[in-house]
Amino acid sequence: MTGVRTRILGLIAAASLALPAMAANLQISPVMINLRAGQGASGITLQNLGEVAVYGQVRVYQWEQKDGDDVLTPTTDVVASPPIIQIGPKSSQMIRLVRRNEQLPASELTYRILIDEIPKDDGPASGVDIRLRYSVPLFVLPADERAAPALAWSVFKKEGIWMLRVRNSGTQRAQIGALQLSNAAGQQFEIATGLFGYVLAGRVREWRLPTSGEADLNGTVAVKANINARPTSASTVARVD
């Protein structure tokens, strides 16, 4: 049961990657946290723009990628304080995030801060009727300031569906955006105009492409994308599994 629940949480986090910084009356800033060398703590500011109080809970998960998908696991490596929030109308609250281990990692560490807005009457213990869930990525940067992603792209058809697999052998995550594929004839396939997803350091991520199974992606495929906000080009040879 625990493994299933963990898997479900990972899927929820993946779906929330593209959530806006503001939904309903709760505004969150920043929407991404980087802990650099010598920085053991940071924080998130929650601002309630509404006319009624907001109640919620804050939990920290280690963010990994296994079997081509996102997986979250509860962790105490990073502590959120306070874990229970109550923000009055037109008020704000700071959530402090403290990393317990000050050692600098050789490869980037990744976490997700889940903030669940919950009804006042149910309280955080019930675990039901979550109104909104916000997911904020937290990255602990590696000791080597030259750390960077190193990506290998694969396009393949599996059971009639075109898939994309990206392997990151580098020591820093790759945030993929503005993704476009082109076939040998020059036909372009717009996969994503904004954020597409992440491939964590030393991990592999797979996605189902939003294209028809009849799309002509056979042979050499050119890849254009923004990786960590920088334009990147690559190529691969599509295959059928």
Image (cartoon, grey):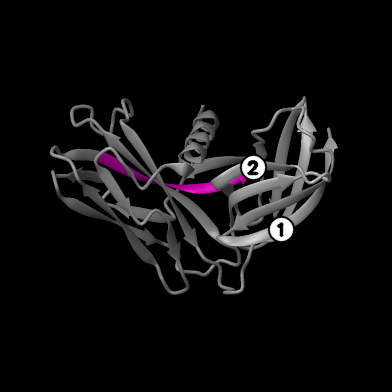
**Residue topped by disc 2:** 190
**Residue topped by disc 1:** 233
The answer to whether 67 is drawn above or below residue 160 in the figure is below
Residue at 20% from the left image edge and 39% from the top image edge: 54
State left or right for residue 44 relative to residue 178: left
Q: Return the x and y of residue 200 as percentages of the image width and height.
A: 60, 53
- Which amino acid is tagged 1? Ser
State left or right for residue 104 relative to residue 233: left
State left or right for residue 207 relative to residue 160: left
Residue at 42% from the left image edge and 42% from the top image edge: 19
Q: Where does the magenta region start and end?
A: 56-67
Label 1 residue SS: strand
Residue at 35% from the left image edge and 63% from the top image edge: 42
Visible residue check, residue 169: no
Confirm whether the magenta stretch covers residue 113: no
Tell me which numbered mark, 2 or 1, is placed earlier along the sequence: 2
Confirm whether the magenta stretch covers residue 64: yes
In front of the other: 21 or 205? 21
